[in-house]
Image: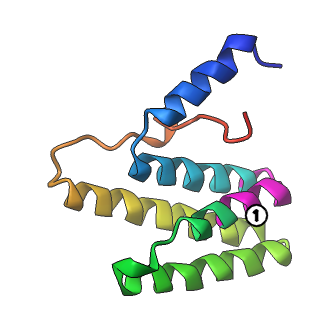
Amino acid sequence: MHAPGMNAYRRQQLESMSPEQLVLVVYEQGVRACRRRDHQRARQAVELLIDGLDFEQGDVAGGLLVLYDWAMRLLRESRFEEAGDLLYELRGTWIEAMGKADGGGQPVPSEGQLRPDLSA
């Protein structure tokens, strides 16, 4: 059970993150859910990633949609390890893309720094 102030802290932490950092949080939540074999939370994370796609930004969104659809299929088949591996690899690619877009000037949070629970 969490202390009452913890939910407010988590909410504030999430609200202060950039959209790019929020995507990292969702990836991490999806990977963690797959490791725990938590079908509902893993699906929820992939659905959030799908909802966040911006198809006006070119072919990247379409490619990601294909990968997210594949992750959903893996989850439907209870292939949690494969789905988690896919989300983990996409997370790494996202971090790399953030670094390039940023010019490498701003540090990207490590996995341990992005721990807010989206369910809170």
Report the magenta residues as a range: 35-46
**Relative to 118, is 19 on the left or the right?**
left
Q: Position of residue 47 (x, y in %)?
A: 68, 66
Q: How many marks?
A: 1
Q: Colour scheme in the image?
A: rainbow
Vertical arrangement, residue 88 with respect to residue 77, above or below: above
Residue 76, position in %: x, y?
84, 76
Q: Position of residue 68 (x, y in %)?
A: 61, 76
**Residue at image point 67% right, 58% down:** 45
Residue drawn at the location 84% of the way across and 57% of the way down = 40
**Residue 94 figure quarter:** bottom left
Kind of residue sitting beneath label 1: Arg
Asked where in the image residue 105 lies, by quadrant, the reply is top left
**Residue under circle 1?**
43
**Side of 11 relative to 77 (left or right):** left
By secondary structure, the bulk of the magenta-drawn segment is best described as: helix
